[in-house]
Amino acid sequence: MSDLEIRRATAADIPVIVAMLADDPLGAERETPDDLSPYLAAFERVAEDPNQHLVVAVREGQVIGTLHLTVIPGLSRQGATRALIEAVRIHADARGSGLGTRLFEWAIEESRRQDCVLVQLTSDVTRTDAHRFYERLGFTASHVGFKLAL
Amino acid sequence: MSDLEIRRATAADIPVIVAMLADDPLGAERETPDDLSPYLAAFERVAEDPNQHLVVAVREGQVIGTLHLTVIPGLSRQGATRALIEAVRIHADARGSGLGTRLFEWAIEESRRQDCVLVQLTSDVTRTDAHRFYERLGFTASHVGFKLAL
């Protein structure tokens, strides 16, 4: 994996990012890869916000992974800035290759660069394999994640 | 509670916000209300970011509650913008008065105004009373919340 590059996503990456978001037990029911227009509109909002870090992992010219890191300033924990990780996906062809670890190492390093003191994420309770992966990376399952659809 | 106002926090509110953050079983170990400087620096970052909505609830001129709402654009769920709630506190004198519900109603309404399709939060596994409160508001405990201290 020495030729792996993790770089900021561009609009040209949106089709493959959306395909990865959809190629997932939960994502398959939630995404619409045949209509990219809502994703392109959302990408504009992400790209213009300096606290959003949407990246892709590229190997041999192919996008094989993605991760979205958000930097969130706040008052609690002595004015701690925290980082939130969302929308991590590894291309089916690249699973089991250590790429998830590489993406998380990038996210943790970037969070440090951004002076974050905490990285957080939530994971659907059904993603038990992912939970073990996060714990191996040092994350603690200390919280319950609540969601409300509007 | 007809005279309750929920408004954007100002720097002048920081001392009472920090006092509320610290007056909490978990916050007591994490906050330093005797040194406001890190909070004031963090407030500047919050105030200049249009996606951060730090509010206070005021009744009869007294700040009695606070909530921090972050608006997060993203690609997943068809380019969904989501809202994240953090740092909710109710002043000890105002607990049990329905103020928490009022603050959450504000946050949910503001999330809709910001075109969010999802509101999310994480709550320490030990805050079981809070979990019941969130479920009464319609939130679903669908996720596990992971944190990594840097």
Image: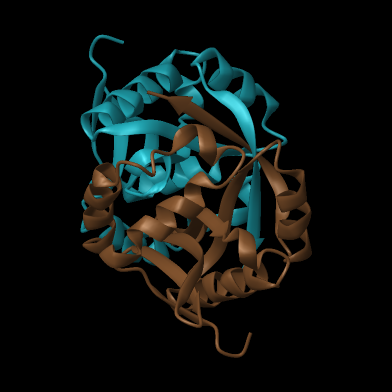
Chain colours: A brown, B cyan
Q: Say which residue appears at 64% left-offset and 55% top-offset.
A: B147
What percent of the width, then of the height, locates residue A144?
Answer: 65, 36
Q: Say which residue appears at 45% left-offset and 80% top-offset.
A: A61
Q: Is residue B35 above or below residue B33?
A: below
Q: Is residue A136 above or below residue B121?
A: below
What percent of the width, then of the height, locates residue A143?
Answer: 66, 42
Q: Is residue A111 left or right of residue B45?
A: right
Q: Is residue A72 visible?
A: no
Q: Residue furthest bottom?
A: A2
Question: In terms of depth relative to the viewer, which is nearer, A24 or A47?
Answer: A24
Q: Is residue B112 left or right of residue B17?
A: left
Q: Say which residue appears at 62% left-offset and 39% top-offset.
A: A25
Q: Is residue B118 left or right of residue A77?
A: left
What percent of the width, then of the height, locates residue B109?
Answer: 28, 23
Q: Is residue A17 visible?
A: yes
Question: In terms of depth relative to the viewer, which is nearer, B110 or A35?
Answer: A35
